[in-house]
């Protein structure tokens, strides 16, 4: 994992969906990082695993986009996914701090367990954990699909409520949600599909993250 730095973070972003209900409680601003060191068989975002590629996005740019979406769409939180957010910890922690400053909650999906993360001597990882309200942890295990907990991929993964903001309520007990958008002729897919639907959309073009200020709704 990268060491914490002092430069203003520029994030390597694979995808942004500014208002989604498929990546955690309520309406959320979802950011996928480009690059994950893990290789879970059956990962539903294999194109997000290489650290090469992605689009460089300044934290300030994403902050402005997040604030506009909060005001326009009433999002309640930021969700960070991968790729692996903790492999981008300095930038991810900075973005989580901005979200907190905007009155938004922070949810993070990680392939590492909470114990592994707490065992890393990286202050940026500690910063990101300190700014996280919900952590869904652990690698995705293809043989253990979770059909009971919405937004969670496999049964080994745990939901850690690291603050009092959320609790396990009825919203978590629904089936997984998949959102498909058609924007200007391009398909955008996010959420976690039923097991039989994994990969059905592969070959469809993902929508690249639009430029700041673009109307993405
Ligand atoms: S940690 Fe997540 S992004 Fe990385 S390989 Fe596993 S499922 Fe895919």
Image: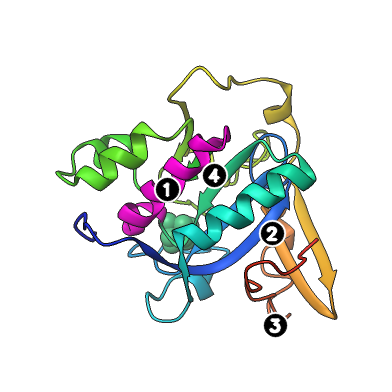
Q: Position of residue 109 (x, y in %)?
A: 48, 46
**Magenta-colored stretch includes residue 132:** no
**Left or right: 30 in relation to 85:** right
Q: Tag 2 or tag 4, which sits nearer the N-term?
A: 4
Comparing marks 4 and 2, which lies closer to the viewer? 2
User: Front-most of 201 and 99?
Assistant: 99
Badge 4: residue crowd in 10 Å (few <14, some 14–19, many ≥20) = some
Per the model, the C-alpha gap separating discs 4 and 2 is: 17 Å
- Circle 1 residue: 110
Q: Main secondary structure of the magenta part?
A: helix
Comparing marks 3 and 2, which lies closer to the viewer? 2
Taking the spot 48% from the left edge, 58% from the top edge, the residue there is 60
> Toward which corner of the image does residue 144 lie, by quadrant?
top right
- Circle 2 residue: 190
Q: Secondary structure at mark 4?
A: loop
Q: Secondary structure at mark 2?
A: strand
Q: Tag 1 or tag 2, which sits nearer the N-term?
A: 1
Q: Position of residue 175 (x, y in %)?
A: 75, 39
Would the CB of label 4 be found within 8 Å of ligand 1?
Answer: no
- Circle 4 residue: 154
Q: Tag 4 or tag 3, which sits nearer the N-term?
A: 4
Which residues fall within the magenta stretch?
Answer: 85-105
Q: Secondary structure at mark 1?
A: loop
Taking the spot 68% from the left edge, 40% from the top edge, the residue there is 147
Q: Is residue 152 visible?
A: no
Per the model, the C-alpha gap separating discs 3 and 1 is: 25 Å
> Toward which corner of the image does residue 11 lie, by quadrant?
bottom left
Picture quarter with the N terminus: bottom left
**Left or right: 130 in relation to 157:** left
- Circle 3 residue: 203
Would the CB of label 1 be found within 8 Å of ligand 1?
Answer: yes
């Amino acid at each position: 994992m990268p060491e914490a730095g002092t430069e203003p973070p520029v994030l390597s972003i694979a995808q942004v969906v500014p208002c989604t209900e498929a990546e955690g409680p309520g309406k959320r601003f979802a950011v996928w990082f480009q690059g994950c060191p893990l290789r879970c068989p059956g990962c539903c975002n294999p194109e997000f695993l290489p650290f090469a590629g992605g689009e460089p996005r300044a934290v300030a740019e994403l902050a402005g986009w997040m604030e506009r979406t909060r005001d326009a769409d009433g999002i309640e939180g930021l969700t960070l996914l991968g790729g692996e957010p903790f492999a981008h910890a300095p930038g991810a922690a900075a973005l989580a701090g901005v979200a907190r400053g905007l009155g938004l909650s922070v949810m993070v999906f990680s392939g590492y367990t909470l114990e592994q993360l707490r065992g890393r001597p990286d202050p940026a990882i500690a910063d990101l954990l300190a700014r996280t309200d919900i952590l869904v942890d652990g690698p995705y295990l293809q043989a253990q699909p979770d059909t009971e907990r919405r937004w969670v991929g496999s049964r080994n993964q745990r939901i850690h409520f690291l603050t009092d903001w959320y609790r396990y309520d009825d919203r978590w007990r629904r089936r997984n949600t998949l959102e498909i958008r058609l924007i200007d002729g391009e398909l955008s897919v996010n959420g976690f599909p039923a097991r039989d639907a994994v990969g059905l959309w592969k070959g469809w073009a993902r929508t690249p993250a639009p430029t700041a200020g673009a109307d993405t709704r």
